[in-house]
Amino acid sequence: MRSLRVSVPAQIAGVGPAVASQGLAVGLRDQFLLEPVASPQISVSVLGREKNSQPSDERNLVITALHAAQDYLGAPRFGLRLSIDTFIPRQRGLGSAVASVAAGVAGALAFAPHGPQPGTDDFRHGVFDLTARLLSRPVGAATAVYGGLANVWHTDPAYDIPRSVVDNDASAVTHRAFVSTYHPAWHAATSRVAPAVDAYLFLPLKARDASLTPVPSDVPPSSGRDPALDLLRREAGLRTDVPSGLLVSSLTRAALLAPVLADPRTGSANERLYEATQPDITLGRLRALMPDAVQLCEHLRSLGYAALIAGKGPTVVVLRAGTDDVALVAARLRGLTASEWLAGGRWTMVHTPLSPEGIEVDPLD
C-alpha cells in the first residue's frame, strides 16, 4: 500500500444566521501523513502549533476514526505510522476534531481494497458520509470535505409523505412509522467563494472548556407545533420556544451569503455580508458561556464588521470583502485585541483567506 498525504481545512460551522445548515472553509489546514508499515504497531508523531493538545499514540482521533471506518467498511486493520502537522487551533470552534476524523476516514477509504479512488466524487461523498456519521456534525464534515461555502440538508422519507395521504391511507401511516426509525440521510452542496473575501480570526489565548456546551440543559424535546422548525431549533441548541418569526427571518437572510461570497465586487458587498451573518439567535445562547467572545462580536458588529462566533466558539470571525486596504483592515482589527476594556489582551488575531477547496488526498509513490 502506498503512503497517503491528507490536508483538511478549518471550518466555521453554522456560519451566520443559517441555523445548523451552512459552513465556511478557511485557509488554516492540518496536514497528515499516513504510512502503512509491515508491523502491526501504531506510531504517532504530532508537530506544529497544537502538538501538545492531542495524544501521540493509538488514542489519537485520526487513528480512532481510521479504525472505526475500517470496521464499518469491513476492511482489515494494519500497522501505521502517522505524522501530523497541526495548524488548526484546538477547542476554539474551528473544527479541529472534524479535520482529524475526516483524515482518518479518508485513509480508511483510500486503503480499502476496493474503495473509491481519491479525488473522485464517490471518494469525497464517502468521506463526508462516514465523517458525519461518526461525529454527528454534518455541517463541519461537509465544509471540511467540499470546501467553500457548504450547504447541508437532510431528507427523511417520513416527512416526504404528504399529510393528506397519511390522513387517508393506513398503509402510508405504517410506512411513515417504519422509515422514521432510520437516521435521516444527509446531503451537501458547495458554493464558490471568491479570493476577494478574507477571514480575520480572533483566537482566544485560552481554549474552550471542553465540558461546556452551548446547548441549554432544559431544551424540551418538542413544542408540539412544527416538527421541522423544532428540528432546526434543536440542531442549533435552541429552546423550542424561540419565535418562529425570528427563526424564519434568520434563515431567509442566510440566502444572501452565497451570492456575496461568490461575487463580492459590488460596492455594497460588506453591507450584505453584515446582513448575511446577523447572529441574532446564536449570541443569546452563548452569552452566559463565553461572555468575552459575545462582547467582542457585538462590539465588532457595532463598528460595521460582519462578525460572528465560529461553531461552538469562542473564536470570533470577521468576514471582509477586499474593497479596502487589507493590511489596514488587519492592523485596525489587530489593535482591538489590545483593548483592556474589551478583551484584556486575551486574544490574538490571524488573517487568512477562505478555502475554496476541501480535503486534499494525495497517494505517494
Image (cartoon, rainbow, N blue to C red):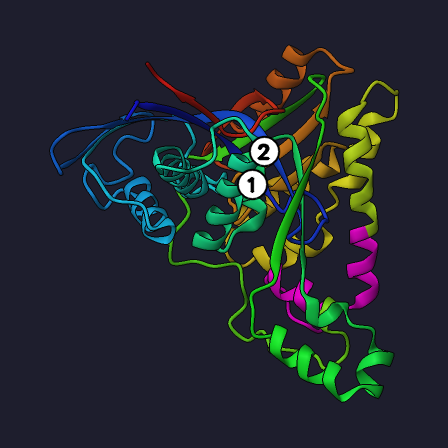
Placement of 354 over or under 139, stated as above or below: above
Q: Which labelled disc corresponds to residue 133? A: none
Indicate yes or no whether the magenta region holds residue 245.
yes
**Residue 159: x and y, percent?**
73, 70
Residue 11 in sight here: no
Q: Nearer the viewer, residue 255 or 327?
A: 255
Q: Nearer the viewer, residue 349 or 66?
A: 66
Q: Residues within 10 Å of mark 1 (few under 14, many from 20)?
A: some
Residue farthest front in this picture: 114
**Residue 348: x and y, percent?**
48, 28
Q: Quadrant of residue 60?
A: top left
Q: How many tags in the picture?
A: 2
Say which residue label 2 marks: 121
Say which residue label 1 marks: 125
- Magenta highlight range: 229-251
**Residue 259: x and y, percent?**
82, 31
Q: CA distance from mark 1 to mark 2?
A: 6 Å
